[in-house]
Image: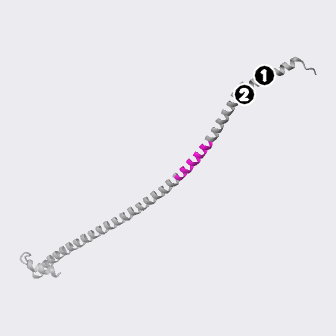
Amino acid sequence: MDLNATLIVQSITFLIFVLLMWRIAWPPIIAAMQARQARIADGLAAADRSAAALADATAKSEQAVSAARVQAQDILAAANKQAQQLIEQAKNTAQQEAARIVAKAQDDVAREVGHAREELRKQVGELAVVGAAKILKREIDAKAHADVLNDLAARI
């Protein structure tokens, strides 16, 4: 192995190249690597914050859904209660109306029965007068004998 001047010059040139790279090129490369490392760390931290925010949002949405369910159940219960009250009120109103109609019908029936009895009394009185006229073989004047007819009708 023969060491000659070329090998020494090449070694010195290589050392100068390494020193120049270490002084000129190495700091920007290291800075770029550190900046990239910082961006990656920031991205990971943002991802962790986003995951935490998502978990919080999920918990809040579940609470909101749960509260909405409870509120919906309360509204449904109130609606059912109101419906039952309306049904009971309608039943009471219908019963009162039915009682009023029955009372009116009974009054109408009683009035009609009274009218029918009065008509029947008049007809019986007239029949009695006609029968008495036939029996006596003479005509009885109804106007002249109104007192007799009224007394007869009252007895019947």
Rendered residue at 87%/20% (across/down) = 7
The chosen color scheme is one colour
Q: Quadrant of the N terminus?
A: top right
Say whether residue 93 is left or right of residue 8. Answer: left
Which residue in the protein does label 2 denote? 26
* Residue 92 to residue 42: above or below: below
Which quarter of the figure has residue 48? top right
Quadrant where the C terminus sits is bottom left
Q: Position of residue 64 (x, y in %)?
A: 51, 52
The range drawn in magenta is: 47-63
The verdict on residue 9 being magenta is no
- Looking at numbered disc 1 in the image, what kind of residue is underneath it? Ile
Closer to the camera in the image, 56 or 91: 56
Residue at horizontal 57%, vertical 48%?
Answer: 56
Q: Is residue 133 visible?
A: no
Rendered position, 67 above or below 149: above
Give the amino acid at mark 2: Trp
Which residue is located at x 10 percent, y 80 percent? 148
Picture disc at residue 16 = 1
Instruction: Determine the residue located farthest toward the left in the rendered image.
Output: 144
Left or right of 21 on screen, residue 75 = left
Secondary structure at badge 2 equals helix
Question: Where does residue 73 sit, x and y in percent of width and height?
Answer: 48, 58
Q: Using the image as rendered, state which of residue 89 and residue 150 is in the foreground.
A: 89
- Say which element carries label 1: helix
In this image, 80 relative to 45: left or right?
left
